[in-house]
Amino acid sequence: MANTKKYGFSTKAIHVGEEPDFRIGATGDVVIPIHLSTTFAREKVDVPTAGYEYTRSLNPTRNALETKLASLENARYGFAFTSGLAAESTILLSLVRPGDHIIAFDDLYGGTKRLINQVFGNFGFEVSYVDAVDPKNVEKAIKENTKLVWLESPTNPLLKLSDIKAISEITCKQGAVLVVDNTFLSPYFQNPLDLGADVVVHSSTKYIGGHSDVLGGSVMLNDNDLFEKIKYHQNSVGAVLPPFDSYLTLRGIKTLALRMERHNENALSIAHYLEHHIKVNKVIYPGLESHPQHELATNQATGFGGVISFEIAGTIDFAKTFLEKLTLFALAESLGGVESLIELPAVMTHASVPKEIREQIGISDTLIRISVGIEDVEDLIGDLEQALS
Amino acid sequence: MSITDFSHAGEQTKAIHAGEVPDPVTKASAPNLVMSTTFVVDADAGFSVEGFEESDTWIYTRWGNPTVHQLEQKLATLEQAETAIAFASGMGAITALLFHLLKAGDHLVISDVTYAALTEMTNEFIPELNIEVTKVDTSDLEAIRQAVKQNTKLIYIETPCNPLLRLTDIEAVAVIAHEAGVKLAVDSTFATPIATKPLLLGADYVIHSLTKYLGGHGDALGGAILGSKADLTPLRKKTAIRLGGVISPFNAWLIMRGIATLPIRMRVHEENALKVARYLEQHSNVKKVIYPGLPSHPQYELAKKQMKNFSGIITFQVENGREQARAFVDKLQIIHYAVSLGHHRSLIFYLDSKDLLQSSFKFKTTEQLASWNNFAGEGIFRFSIGLEDADDLIADLEQALS
């Protein structure tokens, strides 16, 4: 597999980083072993004989994952961290210094906002939140010291999009780094680096891992200078993905293409079903023509993902009754697993956001977020139907 | 709340949810992995497996383990079986079944072509225990009928069989077996529950090597027997717990995780296999392609009747197989030259007829040999088509075949 660029997504997802090892003493195993050793021996004092020294710096199993992650985003480099937030912290630590200015989408995941405001806010960074649906808002917010622009597209839970290509032209002119969180679409449907972004970040806990049983965060990029900075901080800060979790993530990636196709198919059917339901006021899904940015969604990505948000008619109590009556959808936070999950952002994932701010950005008390799994869609719609009646 | 009745659920819903309920204590949505070998019990708990009941609480992991139990429930739901027992490997499951059902003086009727390890086991080891063995081509119903005797206890078939992909009509064999008061076991590893549910066609036992499609990722060995509670409860006591070839909870957990994507994987295995089979069929260097999904398969009508999915294994023959095998080892870039099958990765392996007829398949009749030759000629490439992009697989074959 010398030249991996020519291969399709599924072939890369299965093979890259896991070529059988035929060197003398190696076993030719077709699945990468879980290398649990924390340290590696050397034959001579001066150099690590096989290139490995200590698992925090480089581990064969994590390295296989990082190589595979890079190939999925058509990137030169990939990094694996213990969680999405660990990946984000390392990016921020690597690329921003006190006095620098960050522009971020006002509809970012709550945990990312908390990281930027509460943790990095203490160190003298300046942050502007803008509605990045319109690239002009990003352009207007640019200042002389703007070093980083942080986007999610689509956002969580309102599924707003930002035009990555248009915004990359703005950051390029400014010399700022554009970071795009691609968790919701996964590399199967969207490749932000190809659209002009500098850094892609994923919570691999979601679609990339895919089975709700392993936390992780990924970073992919092309630039050598950015690579050196993040590599240095990955090793110095040390929030590296353990070998076992790297293995489970690798294993999940092997069916990523198949799963994403099914998530997308199911989500589209459910979005159409909900849109016609009398007890539903509004459905937000980029795959629906009613989504205000449907055209951008179609141009920028090859699919729409598995997350749908909708506003149920009636009171928050009706919403709670509905959620508790479901039997297939687990009432739980997180998303991107094979099993369907559902939640009430105002009470669960976004409870830490003050009510006024929630309402200002559009997270009402009756807004429900679904992570559509890969079950048979008739079974999922059947479950929604009985719980809505 | 969570789903417990799967009688109306689709295959994909069953694959994800069956056997798995949120952990009652922590409400964990994904299944726990319980590695404990022993469990704290009441003062009146029995020490002998004689008193073991399926409904007992957990005692010792060889008897039963919560993680293994979740896998067993998921398998049973997919096969529409009353119950299932998981083992350390497919051969572990087969051994437990044979040792449970057969004793000295009994007679076994078994397909003359099965997975080679089982064929070899029934060539020597089983007859040494004074169990009589008759090997027949089970695609020939008359041959089965004639083989059944007074002391026959079990008819054992594989469909599609490994490595020929020859099929056996499960429903018809079940009628023959039951008229004679004999049990029927079907190894359905190649078909998977997505293609065929042998118990619904009248079989008494289904065997799976979970290492293959069910686990699907080439990283965990496992086997299973499925059937009725009346048949399996004594089997669990007699040969599963006592012979001890039980599955490790960790492997059970990995296999369970694999099953979550079984239906979507089987769909892609089938799609890819059909594309590759059609490509090979028109290739000038390829003499013959066998795949149940091709109209050229000698039993295509039976395949359509018995298999909802034609699965992902094909065989093909070329002029000089051994030489081509060397070329594949040197030239293939994506497809691995390796044994086993049913993985996400494509695997290919050459099976030379002369070698196999010496080591494993020792046919007694000219009809049996003729059937082998009809399916395998001088030798076949057994090709387990993975989940890669079909175009990449075809391009890899193209450069290695020319």
Image: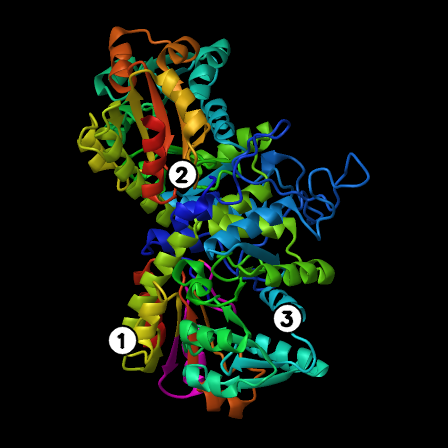
Above/below status of B76 relative to A351: above
Q: Secondary structure at mark 3?
A: helix
The numbered disc on residue B228 is: 2
Residue that appears at 47% across and 63% down: A193
| Residue range (magenta) | A309-337
Kindly identify the amino acid type of the residue bearing the numbered disc 1: Glu
Q: Secondary structure at mark 2?
A: loop
Q: Quadrant of the C terminus of chain A?
A: bottom left
Can you tell which of label 3 and label 1 is closer to the viewer? 3
Q: CA distance from mark 3 to mark 1?
A: 38 Å
Residue furthest out toward the bottom: A356
The one of B111 and A259 positioned closer to us in this rendering: A259
Q: Which residue lies under the disc numbered 1? A: A289
Residue B152 appears in view: no
The numbered disc on residue A95 is: 3
Dot 3 alpha-carbon crowd within 10 angstroms: few under 14, some 14 to 19, many 20 or more: some
Q: CA distance from mark 1 to mark 2?
A: 51 Å
Spot occupied by residue B399 in the image (x, y as percentages of width and height): 34, 31
Residue B69 appears in view: yes
